[in-house]
Image (spheres, rainbow, N blue to C red):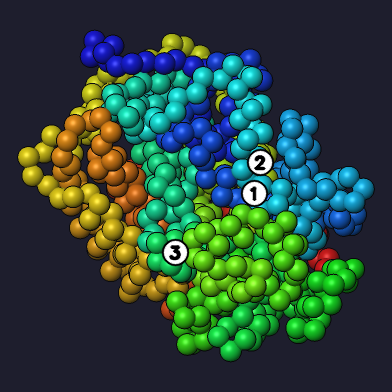
């Protein structure tokens, strides 16, 4: 049979993506005694998790004994504007402390309090200092720890392997098909269960903190396999990315700068965030600069500075200042920690930021302010999953981390991504392994399905004529940046959808020179298919949601509408057409609702 010609690997569980969620899922699945394969698009260790610098949000109570999972749950729900899946937010808040302590047992080296416990720092939207951290390199330490632990679990790792499609047998997923990025040769993975941990969709936008791998592969593969996506309209623009020089525009500036005392200022020197405190946060936030300064000096009053409001609030405020002509010379605002903290404190607490600005922008952050502005950073939307098991709406498919939807609602709080991927990465591995153990019947793969995918994958190399895929990708990024960016409206988004249709047609005819070996043009042509799919899903969902909430702001609907606060916008592919529907949120139990009656 034709399928026999492909290099084939068979496992009980295949995990696609080797960031924090994928590694934690693989570790847990292996601990259940099943055979595990871990597939990553790049090299092991080069996952996006390393860019999560500020810390892991978990109510350990080491700095503030008053902190507990109920407060963390409430902060997460409020940050997501109550659109979160309450059960996911509950499990996350309850299980995050144990996942952090587990990392410590596996060898993670955290910064310490004077009495030797894990130190925790302030972050936007968190009532208490809650982020366990390692300077501003927390994600790097997490990946190091998980990798070192994982390699002893008997996990087979397949590096520089791009998965193109999930394979199905009837109504269940039974594997994946892809190619080795270096040779271009095809590879088939047979599996009883597949875990998606592929991260986000940020490369659909021009200015982004995301690296080349973030092309929405998991979102698109799940969609094509028949799974539901939810909340795709909610895209987080992190308030602080670098804006100068142009070659580094969008690179992340950790929220830890503000958590450690940094303040945002416009070109008049005003701390403008005091002008943007929403009613929702009044009473919890410092009302003036003197009060905020006292907050930094003595945190016993536990009042938040407005520089540490949730990311959506801060990003919109910066956008408003720039549009009003009060921005920095290169189209951002100023982030100042130099006048707030001594130089040795900055270099100790924020070593990566110090070197990043010194080497990339020739700015000494111990002596002068940084220029920062919003950058596309994270998608709250993703594969709809069961809160407890992480199983998608298709049998045999599980998802965790950024490619799963529901946990963060309309806006993610900083630090919640790392605890999210630990909590739900573990659950994905656990329940994928249990599903694999209960798998009934024979594991079969349809060769006609394989041949169809193989032909599609080779098409850009075999066409006699066609466009350069890089040009199409650049146009896609411009469309999303300019028409489906931080502020949206119906006219722009309808224009975007028309442009996306044209780009989809052009991408289907893209052509690349050369063969399958070391051919980045070919890789780009294939990534384009996923990018266009997720861009269309995001735009359609944003057009459907006629309100502003969290990471979705419409200037033609600038209010938050309670009728939209009880539904997710779901996207699914049926008979080749994308369908949009409004799905009711699961009902929160009374005892959790009561938490929101407290201050």
Give the camera-side residue of 244 and 581: 244
Q: Are marks 2 and 1 in contact (CB under 8 Å)?
A: yes
Find disc 3 in the rendering and name its residue: 249
Q: Position of residue 554 (x, y in %)?
A: 46, 73
Quarter holding the C terminus is bottom right
**Label 1 neighbourhood size at 10 Å, few (<14), some (14-19), many (20+)?**
many
From the viewer's side, name the closer residue of 420 and 171. Answer: 420
State the quadrant of the N terminus: top left
306 above or below 502?
below
| Earlier sequence position, callout 2 versus callout 3 | 2
**In the image, what residue occupies the spot 83% across and 48% down?**
112
Q: Which residue is mark 1?
A: 137
Q: How many marks?
A: 3
Residue 464's image quarter? top left
Measure the C-alpha gap from mark 2 to mark 1: 7 Å
Is residue 457 visible in the rendered image? The answer is: yes
Left or right of 110 on screen, residue 519:
left
Give the CA distance from mark 2 to mark 3. 25 Å
Looking at the rendered structure, which numbered label has been put on residue 141?
2
Q: Is residue 226 above or below residue 88?
A: above
């Amino acid at each position: 049979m034709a399928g026999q010609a492909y290099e084939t690997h068979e496992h009980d569980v295949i995990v696609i993506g080797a960031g924090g969620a994928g590694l934690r899922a693989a570790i847990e699945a292996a601990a259940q005694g099943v055979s595990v394969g871990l597939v990553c698009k790049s090299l092991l260790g080069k996952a996006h998790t390393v860019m999560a610098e500020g810390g892991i949000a978990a109510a350990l109570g080491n700095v503030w004994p008053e902190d507990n999972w109920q407060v963390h749950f409430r902060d997460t729900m409020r940050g997501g504007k109550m659109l979160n899946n309450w059960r996911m937010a509950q499990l996350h808040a309850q299980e995050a402390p144990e996942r952090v302590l587990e990392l410590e047992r596996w060898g993670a080296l955290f910064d310490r309090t004077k009495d030797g416990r894990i130190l925790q720092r302030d972050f936007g939207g968190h009532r208490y200092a809650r982020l366990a951290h390692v300077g501003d390199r927390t994600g790097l330490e997490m990946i190091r720890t998980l990798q070192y632990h994982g390699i002893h679990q008997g996990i087979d790792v397949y590096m520089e392997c791009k998965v193109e499609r999930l394979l199905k047998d009837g109504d269940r997923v039974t594997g994946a098909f892809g190619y080795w990025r270096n040779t271009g040769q095809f590879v088939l993975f047979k599996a009883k269960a597949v875990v998606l941990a592929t991260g986000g969709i940020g490369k659909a936008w021009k200015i982004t903190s995301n690296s080349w791998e973030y092309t929405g592969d998991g979102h698109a593969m799940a969609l094509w396999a028949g799974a539901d996506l939810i909340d795709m309209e909610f895209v987080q623009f992190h308030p602080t990315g670098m804006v100068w020089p142009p070659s580094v525009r969008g690179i992340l500036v950790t929220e830890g700068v503000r958590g450690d005392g940094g303040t945002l200022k416009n070109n008049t020197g005003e701390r403008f965030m005091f002008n943007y405190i929403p009613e929702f946060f009044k009473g919890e936030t410092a009302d003036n600069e003197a009060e905020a300064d006292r907050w930094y000096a003595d945190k016993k009053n536990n009042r938040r500075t407005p520089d540490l409001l949730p990311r959506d609030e801060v990003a919109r405020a910066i956008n408003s200042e720039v549009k009003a002509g009060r921005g920095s010379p290169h189209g951002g605002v100023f982030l100042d920690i130099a006048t707030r903290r001594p130089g040795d404190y900055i270099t100790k607490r924020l070593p990566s930021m110090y070197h990043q600005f010194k080497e990339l922008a020739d700015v000494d952050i111990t002596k002068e302010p940084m220029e920062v502005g919003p950058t596309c950073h994270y998608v709250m939307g993703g594969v709809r999953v069961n809160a407890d098991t992480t199983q998608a709406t298709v049998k045999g498919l599980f998802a965790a981390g950024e490619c799963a939807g529901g946990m963060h609602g309309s806006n993610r709080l900083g630090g919640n991504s790392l605890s999210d991927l630990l909590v739900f990465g573990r659950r994905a591995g656990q329940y994928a392994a249990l599903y694999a153990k209960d798998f009934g019947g024979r594991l079969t793969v349809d060769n006609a399905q394989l041949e169809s995918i193989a032909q599609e994958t080779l098409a850009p190399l075999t066409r006699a004529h066609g466009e350069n895929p890089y040009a199409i990708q650049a146009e896609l990024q411009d469309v999303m940046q300019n028409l489906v960016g931080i502020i949206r409206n119906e006219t722009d988004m309808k224009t975007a959808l028309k442009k996306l249709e044209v780009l989809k047609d052009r991408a289907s005819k893209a052509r690349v020179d050369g063969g399958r070996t070391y051919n980045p043009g070919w890789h780009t042509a294939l990534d384009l298919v996923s990018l266009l799919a997720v861009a269309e899903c995001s735009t359609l969902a944003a057009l459907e949601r006629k309100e502003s909430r969290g990471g979705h702001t419409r200037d033609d609907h600038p209010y938050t509408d309670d009728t939209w606060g009880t539904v997710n916008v779901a996207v699914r592919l049926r008979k080749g057409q994308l369908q949009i529907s409004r799905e009711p949120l699961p009902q929160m139990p009374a005892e959790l609702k009561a938490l929101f009656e407290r201050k």
